[in-house]
């Protein structure tokens, strides 16, 4: 199937392309071009029936015309002439030729290679940072092939990922059910419990369309969050919960299902056969195992004895305590324990005992939500689960469980996220709604391979679970020296050690350690060369003043620049890449990919030059090829492209479109080979298309099996269980990690070690922020408000704050560019709508106009987006507030996965107006 480029009257052409400016894409669009000028963006209606939003992009795409012709674009390579770096230093940029710019970059790479790609601390001398959610990879052409050709790259310096994304969900989601992100099966579910998921804003047109259709169909969505977001406004019910107490609400829901519902109301078959619920747990907290095979044991109700979990013909007991003989346990550091006679509880029983205290009445005091509300939400979840019903999908009979739970930012990262992610996944398990039609689904994978097919990433591992490669914590195996500046490998076992793992480690630690490394930890050097593309951590990170200070320490920065901004203000070389409408790239589309991009097709889509590049901007693939040629990396670069670094391998057993590795290939030659290889792969060689065909037609797809939306069939086919409810492996890793750190006299990670629990238990999550306020020199009573952030569709990732059209359309959105607060709370402070207010935390302050609403808790304020620009043209004149100015970079607000939450205690006071420009 294809989308054709169409000629229309008056010498106007309509060029098919895509928008992937946020993780909710890619979305299809067309570019209207007249006399070589892009004049408009429009939907691609030929995608009806293929694209879940029927070819409609979101509002961000409509700003691409202004982006292309922005008078403030950087249109020639530039170099810095002032060696001093800092916010108040003028870089003294001057225009230079492409030859001079690229030779300077290549010379730096050659110098690094001659010195050694690793510094004296074994850290890569080259680092790279890319923007939100990996989306820059859809605009950087063949640059990934350069990264592969070079080898040692530090991706530790985040632009917000790892602390501002749904971090903990990424890690626990992939661990438990191969879900880098999680969504509801909206097209078939009946009830969605949304804990802060603002899908009507951040889900893109696919999610908005699906949820609108679902409401017509009769779906019910309950929104649980401190403020009434657009998603809450479109929901059947809004529950205004106290910030950072979502875990208590969900633990109480687990209690209701375990202790107030009848046992036969749960999906007992799913629990017994597809989870570790029947596994026997000994008194020391470890699974009891067969002494010969080492397999975990279950209690067989047929033979009335403990047997390996995969024994044929057994009927595992779900509840109960049992006396077992001649069994073993495997403790941390390969400790082996033998029991002649011991009492054992099933993991399900242990969970029930642990959850018993968490009644709705208990949670009501924590969450400031009536116990009756918590109980009715849990009961509705159970009542709508349709236990026992089935549905046929793609010829396979699957459970039909039309209930789903989704988690939003500040809920699924930072302290409390482990408990929330566990409870969300366990609630789905209790009713059999995990990875089945109607239930809670994963979308894509990033920590496991292959990235393009999460089902193929499922392999049998130990104990009947999926294989998950954790960073080693055992004695003699633990990496005591970090391989990246955020220390993901020594500190975060669950994240693994891929390039994505680096980006999902505690990226704020990379920035913090440049200033002050903790005791017993080597202070890292800045990288000799830092590449930055579609990233602005000077705005998108927390404690932006500290980030700017540390960024100024980077000795040589190469920024791929669109306009001047707060980050490339520190650059040494600016390279103007051709932007969205001016360059070529092919990416995958369809299948299951992020948020709610579940398609019934899969294939490839092209971004192509609708217009010629402005000024001297160049296609990113051309830039990359030239860097590699001048740096002596051409053969390694071409080899990486042939291996698949540009999308797909160009050579496999049944085809060969590979490039000669000793030659320079132009942009179209490279992407022509990619197009042929990709379409060959999609059709097994039956329908191979070239680049010219794809430029005309825009898209090439083949059917995608809808049953492959769901992981359960793969789990069943391989006889695997979801690693729920009991987390023996994580408990063991935490104990080992603590031993290794303490052997090196490292104790500054001890608070994080407490999160390694076999089963979550409530701890006072909000107290972390109260304690942090005190430790920063403040008193919680002086900072009475919780400040949270939320997204706005025109600004989902903040990368288009300099486009006037985005601000124009966003004026229609409540709270845009303002400090949103409860009208009653504002009245007590003498604040009226439109007044300027100052939001202050113990570290800094920000200012904005007050937007007064009823739909916000009195103890909470909301600041949308990421602003407080001081360099980016147009954006710097908006005078919008930014929560990033007042959230601290903090070790104590970092959880065991290395993430923190967009949350801070603040005061709010009325002021006369915005800050003067020199004070911003």
Image (cartoon, rainbow, N blue to C red):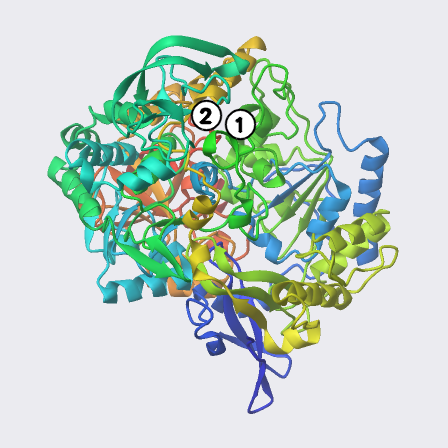
In which quarter of the view is residue 326 placed? top left
Q: How many marks?
A: 2
Tell me, for residue 81, which label it has, or none: none
- Tell me the residue at 39%/49% (across/down): 441
- The residues tagged by marks 2 and 1 sit, at their Cα atoms, a distance apart of 8 Å
Residue at position x 38%, y 43% in the image: 409
The residue tagged with tag 1: helix, strand or loop?
Answer: helix
Q: Which one is closest to the eye, mark 2 or mark 1?
A: 2
As drawn, is 711 to the left or to the right of 649? left
> Element under label 2?
helix
The residue tagged 2 is 730
Q: Which residue is mark 1?
A: 493
Q: Are marks 2 and 1 in contact (CB under 8 Å)?
A: yes
Residue in front for this viewpoint, 259 or 518 = 259
Q: Residues within 10 Å of mark 2 (few under 14, many from 20)?
A: some
Image spot of residue 161 (x, y percent): 51, 41
């Amino acid at each position: 199937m294809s989308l054709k480029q169409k000629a229309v009257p008056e010498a106007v052409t309509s060029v098919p392309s895509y928008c992937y400016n946020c993780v909710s894409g890619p979305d299809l669009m067309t570019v209207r071009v007249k006399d070589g000028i892009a004049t408009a963006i429009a939907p691609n209606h030929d995608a009806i029936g293929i694209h879940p939003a029927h070819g409609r992009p979101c509002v961000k795409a409509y700003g691409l015309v202004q982006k292309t012709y922005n008078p403030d674009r950087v249109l020639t390579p530039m170099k810095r002439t002032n060696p001093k770096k800092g916010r108040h230093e003028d870089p003294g940029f001057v225009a230079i030729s492409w030859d001079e710019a690229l030779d300077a970059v290549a010379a730096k790479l050659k110098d690094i290679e001659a010195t050694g790609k690793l510094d004296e601390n074994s850290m890569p001398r080259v680092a790279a940072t890319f923007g939100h959610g990996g989306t820059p990879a859809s605009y950087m052409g063949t640059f990934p092939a350069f990264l592969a050709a070079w080898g040692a790259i530090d991706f530790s310096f985040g632009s917000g990922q790892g602390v501002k994304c749904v971090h903990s969900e990424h890690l626990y989601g992939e661990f438990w059910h191969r879900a880098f992100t999680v969504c509801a099966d909206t097209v078939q579910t009946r009830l969605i419990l949304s804990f802060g998921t603002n899908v009507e804003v951040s889900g893109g047109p696919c999610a908005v369309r699906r949820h609108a259709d679902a409401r017509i169909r009769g779906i019910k969505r309950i929104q649980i969050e401190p403020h009434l977001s657009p998603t809450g406004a479109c929901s059947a019910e809004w529950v205004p919960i106290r910030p950072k107490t979502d875990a208590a609400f969900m633990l109480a829901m687990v209690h209701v299902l375990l202790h107030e519902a009848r046992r036969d109301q749960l999906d007992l078959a799913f629990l017994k056969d597809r989870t570790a619920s029947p596994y026997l747990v000994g008194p020391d907290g470890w699974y009891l195992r067969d002494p010969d095979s080492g397999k975990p044991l279950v209690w067989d109700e047929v033979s009335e004895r403990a047997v390996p979990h995969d024994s044929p013909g057994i009927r595992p007991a779900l509840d109960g305590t049992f006396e077992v003989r001649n069994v073993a346990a495997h403790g941390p550091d390969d400790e082996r324990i033998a029991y002649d006679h011991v009492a054992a509880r099933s993991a399900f029983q242990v969970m029930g005992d642990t959850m018993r205290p968490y009644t709705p009445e208990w949670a009501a005091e924590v969450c400031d939500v009536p116990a009756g509300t918590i109980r009715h939400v849990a009961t509705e979840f159970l009542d709508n689960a349709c236990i026992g019903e089935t549905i046929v999908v793609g010829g396979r009979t699957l459970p039909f469980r039309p209930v789903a739970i989704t988690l939003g930012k500040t809920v699924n990262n930072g302290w409390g996220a482990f408990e929330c992610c566990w409870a969300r996944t366990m609630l789905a398990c209790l009713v059999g709604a995990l990875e089945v039609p109607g239930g809670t689904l994963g979308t894509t994978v990033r920590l496991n391979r292959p990235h393009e097919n999460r089902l193929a990433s499922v392999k049998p591992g130990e104990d009947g679970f999926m294989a998950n490669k954790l960073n080693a914590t055992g004695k003699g195996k633990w990496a005591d020296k970090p391989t990246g500046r955020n220390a993901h490998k020594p500190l975060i076992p669950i994240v693994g050690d891929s390039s994505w793992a680096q980006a999902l480690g505690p990226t704020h630690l990379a920035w913090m350690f440049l200033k002050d490394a903790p005791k017993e930890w080597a202070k890292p050097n800045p990288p000799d060369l830092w590449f930055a593309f579609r990233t602005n951590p000077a705005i998108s990170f927390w404690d932006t003043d500290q980030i700017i200070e540390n960024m100024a320490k980077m000795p040589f920065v190469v920024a791929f620049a669109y306009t001047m901004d707060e980050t490339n203000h520190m650059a040494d070389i600016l390279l103007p890449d051709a932007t969205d409408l001016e360059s070529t790239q092919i990416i995958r589309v369809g299948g299951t990919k992020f948020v709610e991009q579940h398609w019934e097709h899969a294939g490839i889509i092209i971004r192509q030059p609708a217009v010629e590049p402005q000024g001297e901007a160049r296609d990113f693939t051309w830039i990359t090829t030239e860097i590699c040629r001048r740096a002596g990396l051409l053969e390694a670069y071409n080899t990486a492209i042939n291996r698949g670094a540009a999308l797909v391998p160009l050579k496999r057993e049944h085809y060969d479109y590979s490039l000669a590795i000793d030659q320079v290939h132009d942009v179209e030659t490279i992407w022509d080979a990619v197009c042929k290889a990709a379409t060959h792969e999609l059709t097994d060689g039956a329908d191979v298309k070239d680049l010219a065909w794809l430029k005309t037609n825009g898209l090439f797809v083949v059917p995608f099996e809808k049953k492959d939306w769901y992981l359960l069939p793969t789990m069943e086919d391989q006889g695997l269980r979801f690693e729920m409810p009991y987390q023996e492996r994580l408990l063991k890793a935490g104990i080992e990690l603590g031993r290794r750190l303490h052997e090196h006299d490292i104790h500054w990670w001890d608070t994080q070690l407490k999160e390694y629990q076999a089963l979550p238990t409530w701890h006072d999550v909000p107290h972390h922020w109260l304690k942090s306020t005190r430790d920063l020199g403040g008193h919680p009573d002086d900072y009475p408000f919780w400040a949270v952030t939320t997204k706005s569709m025109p600004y989902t990732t903040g990368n288009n704050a300099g486009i006037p059209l985005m601000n124009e359309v966003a004026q229609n959105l409540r709270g845009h560019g303002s400090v949103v607060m409860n009208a009653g709370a504002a009245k007590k402070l003498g604040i009226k709508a439109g007044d300027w207010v100052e939001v202050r935390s113990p570290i800094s302050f920000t200012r904005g106009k007050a937007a007064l609403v009823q739909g916000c808790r009195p103890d909470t304020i909301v600041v949308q987006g990421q602003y407080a620009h001081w360099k980016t043209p147009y954006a710097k004149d908006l005078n919008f507030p930014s929560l990033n100015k007042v959230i601290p970079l903090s070790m104590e607000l970092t959880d065991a996965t290395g993430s923190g939450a967009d949350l801070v205690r603040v005061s709010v006071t009325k002021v006369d107006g915005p800050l003067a420009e020199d004070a911003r």
